[in-house]
Amino acid sequence: PSDGDDIDSWDSQEGNDYRFEQTTVSQKPHYVADSINSLPGINFNNGHYLDHAAQIFSSTEGTVFIITKSSGFGPGDTILSHGSTPTNGESLRIMTSNSFPIKSSVESRVSFSSDRVDGDTTLSNNTAYILTIGSDGSDYHIRVNGNDETETVSTGSNSGDWFGDNSSIDITTIGALQRVSVSDRYIGDICEIIIYDSYLSSEEIDSVEAYL
């Protein structure tokens, strides 16, 4: 694609052929040829998102790495979500905190009960970040640019509930929270998303972050 082109789909590269798509022209994100460190990314500008109509993550622990740069961090902006379209009661999302100053955050919603944990680094607009968010099955762990965060429970508890703990998930979305409706859309570039279905060791996390 060329700089500014609409993005119709984003395919996973691990061999499962998951395709995140958008068919509505006004909701298609755009290709950015020079996003972070002269490498390309995809720009989501508030109304844009891509989705895959299925639950594609089933593990109860895991690690997510995201390279992103926001042009307008706001409370509750969602980078990646797993949701249930029949009900607002189930979801898991990688997001920003629900209040200023903006921090990285992870939230699980099971049977309409939410658990949300925030990091402690204030995120700035137009700054590149590697966000590493994971669960060991018992607790959430957040890192920003290779540094461990001091997590704070902002809602519920640090349950560590992960993708597989949400029973009625039927859609996975990049750039927004999608349950019964689409909300909390992200504004900024997303350059890479890497997902592991296990909680990686410290050495493995360091290795992936060094690669990124």
Image (cartoon, grey):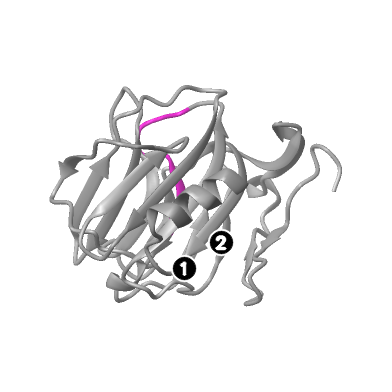
In this view, the residue in front, 202 or 134, is 202
Going from N to C along the chain, the mark reached first, 1 or 2, is: 2
Residue 90 falls in image quadrant: bottom left
| Disc 2 crowd, CA 10 A, few/some/many (<14, 14-19, 20+) | many
In this view, the residue in front, 110 or 122, is 122
Residue, disc 1? 171
| Residue occupying the point 34% across, 44% down | 142
Residue 96 falls in image quadrant: top left
- Relative to 58, is 60 on the left or the right? left
- Residue 155, position as x, y percentages in the image: 16, 45
Q: Is residue 176 visible?
A: no
- Residue 176, position as x, y percentages in the image: 47, 49
Q: Secondary structure at mark 2?
A: strand
| Residue occupying the point 20% across, 54% down | 114
Q: Are marks 1 and 2 in contact (CB under 8 Å)?
A: yes
User: Which range is magenta?
Assistant: 73-81
Question: Rounded to the nearest whole Å, what is the CA distance between mark 1 and mark 2?
Answer: 7 Å
Q: Which quadrant of the rendered structure holds the C terminus? A: top right
- Residue 4, position as x, y percentages in the image: 79, 37
Residue type, mark 2 in image: Asp
| Residue 155 covered by magenta stretch | no
User: Which residue appears farthest toward the left when viewing the image?
Assistant: 156
| Residue occupying the point 33% across, 61% down | 91
Instruction: Give me the disc on residue 51.
Output: 2
**In the image, residue 211 above or below residue 109:** above
